Image: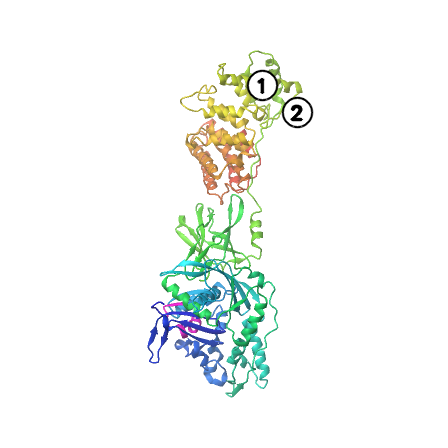
């Protein structure tokens, strides 16, 4: 036992009791040590009384208060004023009760303690406010280091230090604990854990959930109510509310042998109260699911403040409903366990392990609004240890905001709440913040902390001041998730018959196919040029590889024959059988997804051959890379082709990309396919964002002649929302903030340098309205589903 004064206090308001490691000898000398354990008190219906008035007033508890006439009615004169007495039970229940009252209730038997452990009902109705008030009372009463411990845990700790423990402890042993409380009973399951102590291994209970409450008229409140009724019925000649002051009522309710008692009425006359011999217990049936809730336990313990025939009857009724024999623990078991808890806490040994009730918030991420748990699932913590969220929830305060809202759910609360956090002044830019929880088991309310490093500030959320929302949490999350971010439509470049028909400017594709079908040397350049031309906004072949309905079968057949010849021509070039230019390759790539299925693989081989030691036949000069990269982007037709192309893209560092090669290929892939955006991982999205930002920055104060593909790629990236629901949304994704800033800088640059030259003016006129539409999309509220087509046209 510690050489410091330790106290364990069973403060319950029905029959308080304390255990401590020191005695006071007949000469007033204190005797301290392991062999000086004192267990006393057992004050029935305990109260605190106020002596003195004004600044000389003070509250006194314990045995002195039990004997004092203070507050016992007008028959005791001025000191009998009811305002001078309050039961410990009512003090515990009142949220506004001053700390001095609870401190007085404790200090009667715990004064001078250096470490004090206090029992706490393992019942959901015992609020975090009560925990805070008890800790404040320990501090106010100068009772040393305070520790609150659940009664179920203390019952097990008390059992472990008994001379004859109820069972041999072992690691993993499951103990059921039935606790007696005001409302009825509580059912708790605790697991024993073998832990290292200072001198030897020891066992500590682990609490992994809140106890199950069982409402019953056999609870203390029900027993006291019945006892009061029987006492009044036994003494019909006496009037008034004297039963509330009677110790005989408490003795009768708890099964002690009640004795005749003298009370004083308002006129000063003494009344003799004659209690009945025994209490007639309520005929309450216990729920049938008690056995189910305690199934799997190795041992079931019962702790109660009752004794005698009342306890025997409770044990009989509970035993009849249980799957295992019930082990009865002594009345002082909780106080004894509290003393053991104080000893362990004093010496830095494990007292018990506790779970923390979950606290959740709502975050908006790539998959929309989701519930975010601030406490790790299944986390248990040693008593007295501070827990802090290992992974905080992250938000962003938007530019111009002077406050922001946070939605919260507590596992112990019926309804979620919405808290508003005041910043004070509007912020000038997007400010990231992080929400985390700090909490100690059984030590009051959790601290909800929001940190804003950019503002060098920390905010604390007031749960009690937050607005309650009478709506189930999952419904609230779903309600906030109702409006997913918009997604630009997939780009489909349409086809039309105009490019197939002859005009004054020259033959159409149909005539060119007929002319070249029988030629030994095909005019690949003429065919490729016509395929790449766009008349009235339409190509000969759509980007999905479709032909206009008006194209006759014989012309389709000619196209197929020349496509086969073009592919053979390309393969002969690769094999070195002939030397020629890339016009046949160009003819194939401008057929988009109608090109031969093996073409993407041939283009990828050329791309992979990009080394100083080898020159692929397709690479005739530097601009040939444009055809290879863009041709691959045009002709990919399935997930396998797209996966290979994306993998090849990221083999080259993004700072080495060319806007007409890799950037264009990436833009084509993401804008024209429903599968390519699904293949990107978040890290790859961020790399593409970095490339877009690079190209936007590179074009500032220029003529924007290299601005073709950066906005196009940005819009294509927004299609990643097909996989990551709210990706790249301002306020939910930091990358979106960067993209929005880049767009806004470009728009500002258009205004600063307008009229610099005609080329620039044309670019600005085309792109400025599209930039504002891009901003709308980044906000998740795009209004132009054809944005990709408009950007392509631009």
* Residue 653 spot, x, y in % from top left: 42, 32
Query: Measured along the vertical axis of the image, is residue 72 above or below residue 769?
Result: below
Seen as rendered, the residue at the extreme top is: 520
Task: Give me the residue at 59% from left, 84% from top.
Answer: 236
Quadrant for residue 678, please give it: top right
Say which quadrant the N terminus sits in: bottom left
Please name the residue that numbered disc 2 is placed on.
Answer: 549
> Mark 2 falls on what kind of element?
loop
In reply to whether residue 161 is colored magenta, the answer given is no
Q: Nearer the viewer, residue 366 or 450?
A: 366
Precedes in sequence: disc 1 or disc 2: 2
Q: Nearer the viewer, residue 433 or 506?
A: 433
> Mark 1 falls on what kind of element?
helix
Determine whether label 1 and label 2 are within 8 Å by CB: no
For marks 1 and 2, give the CA distance. Answer: 22 Å
How many other residues sit within 10 Å of disc 2, few (<14), some (14-19) or many (≥20)? few
Residue range (magenta): 99-116
* Residue 442 spot, x, y in % from top left: 45, 62
How many other residues sit within 10 Å of disc 1, few (<14), some (14-19) or many (≥20)? some
Please name the residue that numbered disc 1 is placed on.
Answer: 564
Which mark, by number, is residue 388?
A: none
Q: Is residue 242 visible?
A: yes
């Amino acid at each position: 036992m510690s050489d410091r004064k330790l106290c364990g206090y069973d403060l319950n308001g029905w029959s308080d009791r304390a255990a401590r490691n020191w005695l006071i000898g007949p000469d007033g000398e204190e005797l301290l040590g392991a062999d000086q354990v004192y267990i006393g008190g057992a004050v029935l219906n305990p109260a605190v009384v106020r002596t003195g008035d004004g600044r000389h007033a003070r509250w006194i508890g314990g045995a002195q208060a039990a004997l004092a006439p203070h507050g016992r009615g007008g028959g005791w004169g001025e000191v009998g004023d009811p305002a001078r007495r309050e039961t410990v039970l009512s003090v515990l229940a009142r949220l506004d009760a001053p700390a001095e009252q609870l401190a007085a209730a404790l200090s009667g038997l715990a004064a001078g303690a250096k470490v004090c452990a206090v029992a706490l009902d393992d019942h959901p109705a015992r609020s975090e406010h009560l925990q805070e008030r008890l800790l404040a009372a320990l501090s106010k009463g100068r009772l040393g280091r305070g520790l609150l411990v659940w009664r179920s845990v203390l019952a097990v700790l008390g059992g472990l230090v008994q001379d004859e423990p109820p069972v041999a402890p072992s690691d993993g042993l499951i103990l059921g604990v039935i606790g007696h409380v005001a409302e009825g009973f509580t059912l708790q399951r605790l697991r024993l854990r073998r832990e290292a102590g200072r001198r030897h291994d020891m066992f500590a209970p682990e609490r992994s959930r809140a106890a199950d409450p069982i409402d019953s008229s056999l609870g203390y409140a029900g027993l006291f109510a019945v006892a009061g009724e029987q006492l009044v019925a036994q003494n019909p000649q006496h009037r008034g509310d004297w039963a509330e002051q009677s110790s005989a009522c408490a003795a009768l309710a708890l099964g002690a042998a009640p004795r005749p008692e003298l009370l004083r009425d308002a006129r000063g006359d003494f009344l003799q109260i004659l209690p009945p011999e025994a209490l007639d217990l309520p005929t309450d049936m216990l729920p049938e699911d008690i056995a189910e809730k305690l199934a799997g336990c190795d041992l079931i313990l019962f702790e109660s403040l009752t004794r005698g025939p009342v306890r025997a009857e409770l044990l009989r009724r509970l035993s009849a409903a249980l799957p295992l024999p019930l082990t009865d623990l002594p009345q002082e078991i909780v106080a004894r366990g509290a003393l053991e808890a104080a000893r362990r806490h004093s010496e830095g040994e494990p007292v018990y392990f506790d779970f923390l009730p979950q606290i959740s918030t709502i975050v908006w991420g790539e998959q929309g609004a989701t519930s975010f748990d601030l406490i790790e699932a299944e986390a248990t913590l040693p008593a007295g240890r501070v827990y802090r969220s290992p992974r905080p929830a992250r938000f962003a305060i938007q530019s111009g905001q002077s406050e922001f809202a946070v939605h919260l759910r507590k596992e112990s609360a019926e309804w979620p709440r919405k808290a508003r956090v005041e910043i004070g002044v509007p912020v000038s830019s997007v400010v990231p913040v992080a929400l985390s929880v700090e909490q100690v088991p059984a030590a009051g309310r959790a601290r909800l902390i929001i940190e804003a490093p950019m503002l060098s500030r920390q905010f604390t959320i007031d749960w009690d001041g937050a607005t309650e929302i009478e709506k189930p949490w999952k419904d609230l999350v779903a309600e906030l998730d109702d409006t997913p971010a918009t997604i630009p439509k997939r780009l489909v470049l349409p086809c039309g018959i105009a490019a197939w028909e002859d005009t004054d400017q020259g033959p159409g594709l149909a005539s060119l196919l007929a002319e070249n079908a029988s030629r030994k040397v095909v005019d690949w350049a003429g065919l490729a040029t016509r395929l790449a031309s766009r008349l009235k906004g339409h190509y000969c072949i759509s980007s999905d590889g479709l032909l206009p309905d008006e194209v006759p079968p014989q012309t389709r057949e000619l196209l197929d024959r020349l496509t086969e010849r073009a592919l053979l021509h390309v393969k002969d070039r690769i094999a070195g059988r002939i030397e020629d230019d890339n016009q046949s390759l160009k003819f194939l790539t401008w057929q988009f997804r109608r090109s031969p299925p093996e073409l993407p693989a041939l283009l990828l081989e050329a791309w992979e051959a990009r080394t100083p030691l080898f020159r692929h036949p397709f690479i005739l000069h530097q601009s040939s890379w444009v055809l290879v990269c863009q041709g691959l982007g045009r002709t990919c037709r399935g997930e396998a082709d797209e996966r290979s192309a994306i993998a090849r893209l990221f083999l080259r560092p993004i700072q080495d990309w060319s806007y007409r090669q890799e950037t264009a290929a990436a833009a084509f892939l993401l804008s024209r396919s429903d599968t390519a955006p699904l293949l990107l991982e978040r890290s790859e999205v961020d790399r593409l964002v970095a490339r877009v930002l690079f190209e936007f920055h590179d074009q500032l104060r220029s003529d924007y002649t290299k601005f073709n593909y950066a906005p196009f790629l940005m819009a294509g990236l927004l299609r990643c929302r097909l996989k990551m629901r709210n990706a790249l949304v301002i306020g939910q994704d930091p990358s979106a903030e960067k993209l929005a800033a880049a767009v806004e800088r470009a728009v500002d640059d258009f205004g600063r340098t307008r009229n610099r030259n005609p080329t620039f003016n044309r670019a600005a006129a085309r792109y400025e309205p599209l930039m504002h539409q891009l901003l709308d999309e980044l906000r998740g509220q795009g209004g132009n589903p054809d944005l990709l087509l408009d950007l392509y046209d631009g």
